[in-house]
Image (cartoon, rainbow, N blue to C red):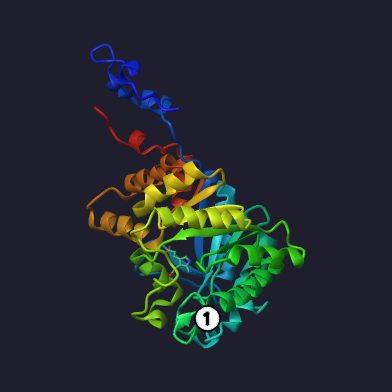
Amino acid sequence: MAIKQNSFLGRFPKTRLRRNRKAGWARNLVAENWLNVHDLVWPLFVQEGEGKRTPVTSMPGVERLSIDILIEEIKEAAAAGISAVALFPVVEQDKKSDLAEEAYNPENLMCRAIKSVKEAVPNIGIICDVALDPYTTHGQDGLVIDGYVHNDQTIEVLCKQALVQANAGCDVVAPSDMMDGRVTVIRDYLDLHGHELVQIMSYSAKYASSFYGPFRDAVGSSDNLGKHSKASYQMNPANGDEAIREAALDIAEGADMIMVKPGMPYLDVLARVHEQFSVPVFAYQVSGEYAMIQAAHQQGWLDGKRAMLEALIAFKRAGATGIFTYAAKDVAIWLRDHTQHHTSLMKAS
Ligand code: PBG
């Protein structure tokens, strides 16, 4: 229980809170949160081809990788202690369709990537998005019927997509589409097919956000989506209480883990969800958040490393169990070099 009476906590001059901040070791000693390499999930973009790395212009330092290169990167991530990777496919235009059939083709890019990574790097978790946007000609996360993203018919396709991914060796399916009721139906479908150990990480509170812009460039869905928005299924940024209802429903439906997304603009939502429910909750530092820090760093307007570590420790402070960040590999290296706390990187006086 929080102590409300300030008199309990002392008074100046006997009490000086700056004492505990007088040196790096002291600040470290009293730190309430630490970033750990095992907290990290590294999102990666996979593309067709061999020996291919294609930079994502709007995400400095991020590349789309062909499967062979992907494996090499993931080997390094596993060696550094990163717990899991989240894979996103760059689907070729001629594979996209109105009904997103490629999403449940067992030989699609995603399934081939999952199989290869699982075989080459068995000791890292593989998380896969369950949503149709990489596969639809219109870039929406579901099937569009009479101008509306149809909830229940979309779920049928999501189930088939989740199943081919689970069959390929995916450890965690992550529905990111915000259809109502999809967690329970996907859970039943996976169980029916013998996948009761495949976890579901539900993007429970996913907002209709402009911070996804660079991601849509990376997977090549922004042109398809054009000026259309996802506001009929992703949440209104104005709402907080509604996120609690979304999370409660997903937990009741059997989600093993839940997510709040984007990260930094929604720290209040993350903190509320964490306080309300005893389930692992993840923060996603999305593409736009990553891009902002990188861009400002490139301009010399801030120190990208310190800003990144500060942003990530904020997720821990707000209650995140784990964090998705495109900077995961860099962060893993910084942590290994013991420069993990952003305040220990600063010369204090
Ligand atoms: C697809 C999906 C998106 C992201 C993750 N899965 C984009 C969207 O909903 O339009 C965004 C991730 C990011 O911006 O880093 N459903």
In the image, ligand 1 is in what quadrant? bottom left
Quick check: 40 above or below 295? above
Q: Position of residue 147 (x, y in %)?
A: 44, 85
User: Which image quadrant is residue 6 in?
Assistant: top left
Residue occupying image coordinates x 59% and y 60%? 127
For this view, does 109 lie left or right of residue 140?
right
Residue occupying image coordinates x 52% and y 88%? 94
Quick check: 96 above or below 195? below
Q: Is residue 241 visible?
A: yes
User: Which image quadrant is residue 195 in?
Assistant: bottom right
Quick check: 221 above or below 169? below
User: What kind of element bears circle 1?
Assistant: loop
Residue that label 1 marks: 143
Q: Position of residue 283 (x, y in %)?
A: 46, 52
| Front residue of this view, candidates 310 and 269 | 269
Q: Position of residue 323 (x, y in %)?
A: 48, 50
What residue type is disc 1 on? Leu
Q: Position of residue 304 (x, y in %)?
A: 32, 50
| Front residue of this view, candidates 108 and 62 | 108
